[in-house]
Image (cartoon, helix red, strand yellow):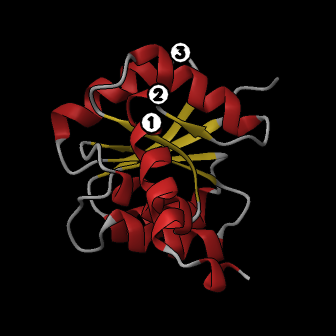
Amino acid sequence: MKQPRILMADDQAIVLAGLRKLVEAEGEVVGMGEDGRSLVDATQQLRPDIVLLDISMPLLNGLDAARQISKLAPESKLIFLNMHATPTYATEAFKAGASGYLIKRSAAVELKQAIQAVMQGQHYMTLLITKDVLAATLQSREDQSPASLW
């Protein structure tokens, strides 16, 4: 499998620098940014295979950036790397076009697994949140009346 071309964005410079070191082992870093608006522009220009992004970013948050990127560059796979370990954020990320969702306290090896999975056309969600997302989904189904399911 060829090494993916990866574009990254995070509003924290130190996180972005550390992330770059991890990602360079898995692919070619073609660009980095610190806000959602520049990420959308860079995605249009660079057409990366993977876009790593955070939800909390200035000028344009990651969810809105993901929605735009999904329309402008649908071939780019989106992996969120976020500090929020709540089902709501993960669900919204996937609705916005994400192929993967990690939290910043995920193990470094998970980033490698996520990159490999999305490059093979799969989705990836960190195990640190999967149980909570499943529980929220099942609770949502239980809250619906049987009549509304049909």
Distance from Cα at disc 1 to Cα at disc 2: 7 Å
**Label located before the other in sequence (3 or 2):** 3
Q: Which residue is mark 1?
A: 131
Between 123 and 39, the one lying in front of the other is: 123
Marks 1 & 2, CB-CB < 8 Å contact: yes
For badge 2, the amino acid type reads Leu
Distance from Cα at disc 3 to Cα at disc 1: 29 Å
Q: Image height check: is 63 above or below 146?
A: above
Q: Which residue is mark 2?
A: 127
Q: Image height check: is 114 above or below 39?
A: above
**Which label sits on residue 102?**
none
For badge 1, the amino acid type reads Lys
* 116 on left or right of 129: right
Residue 20: image location, x then y, percent: 38, 28
Crowd band around label 2 with a 10 angstrom C-alpha radius: few (<14), some (14–19), many (20+):
some
Residue 73: image location, x then y, percent: 66, 67
Q: Which residue is mark 3?
A: 25
Crowd band around label 3 with a 10 angstrom C-alpha radius: few (<14), some (14–19), many (20+):
few
Between 128 and 68, the one lying in front of the other is: 128
Marks 3 & 2, CB-CB < 8 Å contact: no
For badge 3, the amino acid type reads Ala
